Amino acid sequence: MNVLVTGGAGFIGSHLCDRLLARGAQVWCVDNMHLGRRRNIAHLESRPDFHFFELDVLQREALDSLFAKAGFDAVFHMAANSDIAAGVADSRLDLTLNHLTTLTVLEAMRAHGVKRLFFASTSAVFGENDALLGEDAGPLQPISFYGASKLAAEAYVSVFAHTFGVSAVVLRFPNVIGERATHGVIYDFLAKLRKDASRLQVLGDGNQAKPYLYVGDLIDAMLAAWDKSKDPLSVYHAAGIETTTVREIAEIVVAAAGRPDTCIAYTGGDRGWAGDVPRFRYDISRLQSLGWQPRHHSTDAVRFAVERILANGF
Ligand SMILES: NC(=O)c1ccc[n+]([C@@H]2O[C@H](COP(=O)([O-])OP(=O)(O)OC[C@H]3O[C@@H](n4cnc5c(N)ncnc54)[C@H](O)[C@@H]3O)[C@@H](O)[C@H]2O)c1
C-alpha cells in the first residue's frame, strides 16, 4: 500500500509512520514543520520505503505533484494546528490549518481518484457535555475554534464520502500522550520544571479530568478501525479507561522528574484556558466491538507516558 501521512513529523503522525512501515506500506510523509520535528522521523529517513517532504498541504500544486508521482492508495490526514490555546488567540489559525487543509486534501484525493481516507478528529467537537459520549451523541457545540474547525472538517469528509465515493474513517481522539509529544499537559509541565524546578504553576484548579490514552494504544485503535471499516463514513471514539485529573498528572510529573519538593501552585478556576473542556467521558464500545481494547488505565497511561518522554528526551 502506498500511503500519504500528512503531519507525519508530528507527535501522533510519526508513531503512525512507524506502524504503517512495520505493516509493509510505502509511507510518504509530508509536514510543514509548524509543530512537527525532524527528530521525530530521523530514525526513518534512511529507509527506502519512507519518503519525507517538507511541504504545506495548502500548497495545492505541490500536493498535486506528489499525488501524481506517488499514486496513493490511501491518505491519513493528521496535519492540523494541535495547540487549542493558540487557536483561541488567532481565530483563523484552526480554520486554515484544520479545516482548509482537510478540504485541500479531499480535493486532491478527488482529483487523483484516491478512495480511502483516515481523518484525525477530536472530542473537542462536542464542547462541554457531561454525558457518556457515544459517536451519535449530541449536541455538537464546540467551545474552541479548534473543535469548530474539526467539526466542519468532519462535515466535509462526510460530503466527500457520500458524494464522491471516498470511504472515510473518522476517529475522535481523546487526550493522547506519549514520547515525541509536541505539546500537551505533560510536555508543558516538564518544560516548566526545566525552567524552574522549585515551582510548578498549573492552569485551573487541577480538577479537570479526562480519559488519557497512550499513543501506542491510539495507533492500535486507528488501525483496528481502518482494517474493519468499509462504509462510506465510519465514526469511532477511542479513550483510556476512566479519567485522570490534572492534579494527579502534576503530582506524577513532579515525582518522576525527581523533584518531590516542588511546590505545585494552581491558578484557580475550573479550566486551563478559554476553550478548554474541563471534563469529558467517552463510550468506546463501538471500537471495542471490533476487538480493540486500551492496554492502559488512564492514570497508568500518564505514568507510562511520563517515563517514555523522560527516557526519549523532549
Ligand atoms: N494529541 C492529541 O491529544 C490529539 C487529540 C485530538 C486530536 N488530535 C489530532 O491528531 C492529529 C495529530 O496531532 P498531534 O498531537 O500529533 O499534533 P502535532 O502538532 O504534533 O502534529 C500535527 C502536525 O501537522 C503539521 N502541520 C500543521 N499544518 C500543516 C500543513 N498546513 N501542512 C503540513 N503539515 C502541517 C504540524 O507541523 C505537525 O507536525 C491532529 O489532527 C490533531 O488535531 C490530537
Image: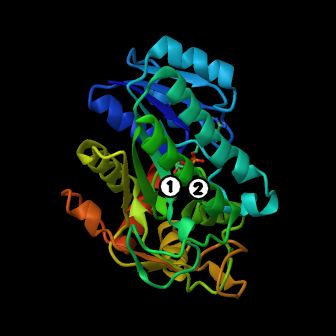
- Within 8 Å of ligand 1, the CB of disc 1? yes
Residue under circle 1? 121
Query: Given the image, on which type of amino acid does mark 1 rest?
Result: Ser
Considering every residue shown, the one lying at the far front of the view is: 163
Horizontal and vertical percent position of residue 165: 40, 36
Is residue 17 or residue 106 the one in the foreground?
106
Q: Secondary structure at mark 1?
A: strand
Is residue 148 or residue 7 the one in the foreground?
148
* Vertical arrangement, residue 192 with respect to residue 207, above or below: above
- Within 8 Å of ligand 1, the CB of disc 2? yes
In this picture, residue 244 sits left or right of residue 156? left
Residue under circle 2? 150
Rounded to the nearest angstrom, the CA distance separating label 1 from label 2 is 6 Å
CB within 8 Å, label 1 to label 2? yes
Query: Reading the chain from its start, which is encountered first: label 1 or label 2?
Result: 1
Horizontal and vertical percent position of residue 264: 63, 81
Q: Quadrant of residue 196?
A: bottom right
Q: Secondary structure at mark 2?
A: helix
Can residue 314 be seen at all in this image of the molecule? Answer: no
